[in-house]
Amino acid sequence: MIVTGAGRGIGRALALEFAQAGANVTCCARRMQEIEETVRLIAAAGGTGLAVATDIVDRAQVERMVQTVLQRFDRVDVLFNNAGSFSCLGGVWEVDPDTWWRDVTVNLLGLMLCCRAVLPHMMSRRQGIIINMNGGNQIPGGTGYSCSKVAVARLTELMAKEQEREHTGVLVFGMGPGFVRTEMTEYQIQSPEGQKWLPSSRDAVLAGHDRKPEDCARTSVELVRCACPEMNGRHFGAGMDVDKTLAELKAAKG
């Protein structure tokens, strides 16, 4: 499998959890030192990992990464699009447009490029799972991030419908991690912009309401374990009971 943004935080937790479950995990991020550390932790726990430095908004780098994975492991069963950006905080009238667009580009274009690179392989094998990390989509002061996540949610649903139309067997899910204290959210907690526009982040930490990255990782492993057509195109959340949710979906379908 491939995990983007695997150098720290939720991405590292995902890589470790899936490796523990028996997956060969390719860890991708721009910072080679960080993903090499993730792979070292995987190996120390008896798993198999591969570090491939990749800027997901660079189409050539993404395509080379996928080819590297196929040469090493011969297949990609799961792509987890975890990498994201939330660097732009402030009202639309005051933020830097380039920083705003960078959030949109990483969260939306980067995800699309990764999906585009793995889908032909998955479709030819008539199996595969793509999980797209979703997040808050109604955040005043975080419009670049929010708008991109609205688009990711719709892209997830539409990619699922495209695969159903082509009868490929490839499944596409959305995953919401909840509020997790990471390098990204630390900026919201510590910066003046974050304290002005997103005081809820600091409040959540002070109240102990932040989630552990392992919550999302464990739920994601269960999601893959239970993956079936009834779940295609749907969005799930960290800490949920996947078996219960699947039973409800099947019952509703009749």
Image (cartoon, rainbow, N blue to C red):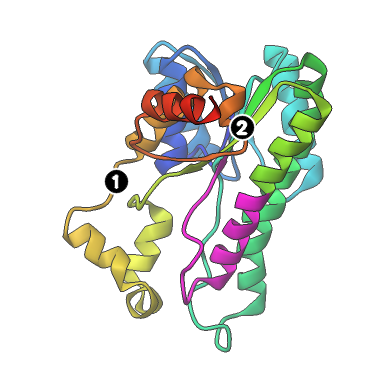
Answer yes or no: is residue 8 visible.
Answer: no
Name above or below for residue 113 compared with residue 167.
Answer: below
Residue at numbered disc 1: 211
**Residue 186: x %, y % from top left:** 35, 60
The image quadrant where one finds the N terminus is top right
Residue 173 vertical position relative to residue 143 in the rendered view, above or below: above
Q: Secondary structure at mark 2?
A: loop
Q: Amino acid at mark 1?
A: Arg
**Mark 1 crowdedness (10 Å alpha carbons): few <14, some 14-19, many ≥20:** some
Left or right: 189, with 54 as reference point: left
Can see residue 145?
yes
Q: Nearer the viewer, residue 187 or 33?
A: 187
- Lateral position of residue 124 relative to residue 1, left or right: right
3D distance between C-alphas at marks 2 and 1: 25 Å
> Magenta span covers which residues?
132-154
Q: Nearer the viewer, residue 247 or 163?
A: 247
Tell me the residue that label 2 is attached to: 232
Relative to 242, is 72 on the left or the right? right
Q: Is residue 153 magenta?
A: yes
Label 1 near label 2: C-beta < 8 Å?
Answer: no
Residue occupying image coordinates x 76% and y 40% = 61
Residue at (44, 35) in percent of width and height: 12
